[in-house]
Amino acid sequence: DAKTTQPNSMESNEEEPVHLPCNHSTISGTDYIHWYRQLPSQGPEYVIHGLTSNVNNRMASLAIAEDRKSSTLILHRATLRDAAVYYCILLKYNNNDMRFGAGTRLTVKP
Amino acid sequence: GAVVSQHPSRVICKSGTSVKIECRSLDFQATTMFWYRQFPKQSLMLMATSNEGSKATYEQGVEKDKFLINHASLTLSTLTVTSAHPEDSSFYICSAATGRGTDTQYFGPGTRLTVL
């Protein structure tokens, strides 16, 4: 299974943009890139996912490299409520078998 | 968005007792439900995958006789921790998916189990 690599932690200032990187150099053509986040003492929540093209939703944007070996989750204006662990996960179509790595712990400073 | 609930949210039990945790999809039918365990300061670890009406598929190293999973309907899955011991104390999280395409998983809020 393709693996993802993320920095252990990142810091951001409130109301500034945050770029969370994820490397997935062994990604296959059928792998979708999913991002979830987990706030303290809660279950994870879906953020965004994509295959090849960049994606936007009300929570974030996902920028996918042309070779698909890396992606970046973009929070346009970080708030204190965005402090969480962010997980980048690869999933194949019709396969919900989700394996979590260590993720990136995002700290947002006021 | 879709909502998944878990009950109870927190449970404390004595060593040797059994504890049942319920996971419900409130506004959609979940073909597949997943159970995860998360120890402090660690990531989620998948324990088992269950499809409605079928036996659960357990991950390597997870004892199926200790962690009994029942997925009796498209909206309910239960995890029973049998003969719980202190090392079973953990945060148990379920998730549900419709099982179609690149469907997202919807996670419950988690159940904090403490075994004394």
Image: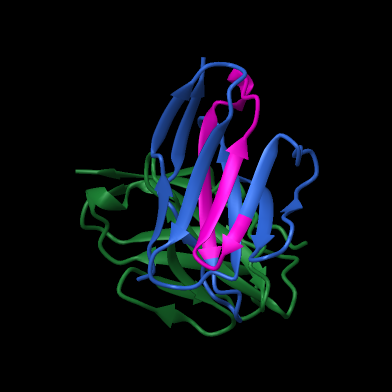
Is B16 placed left or right of A73 in the picture? right
Is A31 placed left or right of A40 in the picture? right
Q: Is residue B72 magenta?
A: yes
Is A74 placed left or right of A31 in the picture? left
* Chain appearing in green on the rendered image: A
Where the C terminus of chain A falls, by quadrant? top left
Residue lying furthest bottom in this view? Answer: A53
Colour treatment of the image:
by chain
Q: Residue at x 65, y 48 (%)?
A: B69
Where the N terminus of chain A falls, by quadrant? bottom right
Q: Residue at x 36, y 69 (%)?
A: A60
Q: B60 or A110: which is nearer to us?
A: B60
Q: Is residue B39 above or below residue B108?
A: above
In the rendered structure, the colour chosen for chain B is: blue
Image coordinates of residue A29 in percent, x first then y, are 73, 80
Q: Is residue A98 visible?
A: yes
Q: B101 or B22: which is nearer to us?
A: B22
Image coordinates of residue A81 in percent, x first then y, are 26, 50
- Total number of numbered discs in the rendering: 0
Q: Is residue A55 above or below residue A71?
A: below
Residue A32, located in which quarter of the rendered image? bottom right
Residue lying furthest right in this view? Answer: B60
Main SS, magenta region, reads strand
Which span of residues is magenta-colored? B71-96
Q: A19 or A48: which is nearer to us?
A: A48
Q: Is residue B44 visible?
A: no
